[in-house]
């Protein structure tokens, strides 16, 4: 005879494993370190300054 399994506990364990896998996928997809966010913000600010510096003023008239 096989081992007795509590189906409610098995179902919850399976759901927990699925949630854990989903969380790992989300961390890989969306997660960034503080250093990466800071670096990206600095690059964005640098690009904006470069663009503003190259802007030509339109004549008023």
Image (tube, rainbow, N blue to C red):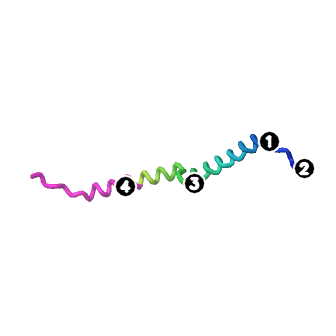
Tell me the tag on residue 28: 3
Q: Position of residue 57 (x, y in %)?
A: 19, 55
Q: Which residue is mark 2?
A: 1
Q: Position of residue 26 (x, y in %)?
A: 57, 50
Element assignment for label 1: loop
In the picture as drawn, the residue positioned furthest to the front comes out as 1
- Direction from residue 32 to residue 56 in the image, left or right: left
Real-space Cα separation, disc 4 to disc 2, in angstroms:
70 Å
Real-space Cα separation, disc 1 to disc 3, in angstroms:
33 Å
Pick whichever of labels 1 and 2 is earlier in the sequence: 2
Element assignment for label 3: helix
Report the span colored magenta.
Answer: 43-61
Tell me the tag on residue 6: 1
Q: Which residue is mark 4?
A: 46
Residue drawn 81% across and 44% down?
5
Closer to viewer: mark 4 or mark 2: 2
Does 52 appear in magenta? yes
Tell me where residue 58 sits by quadrant. bottom left
Closer to viewer: mark 3 or mark 4: 3
């Amino acid at each position: 005879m096989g081992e007795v399994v509590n189906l409610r506990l098995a179902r919850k364990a399976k759901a927990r494993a699925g949630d854990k896998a989903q969380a790992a996928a989300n961390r890989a997809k969306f997660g960034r370190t503080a250093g990466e966010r800071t670096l990206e913000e600095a690059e964005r600010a640098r690009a904006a300054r470069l663009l503003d510096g190259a802007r030509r003023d339109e004549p008023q008239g």
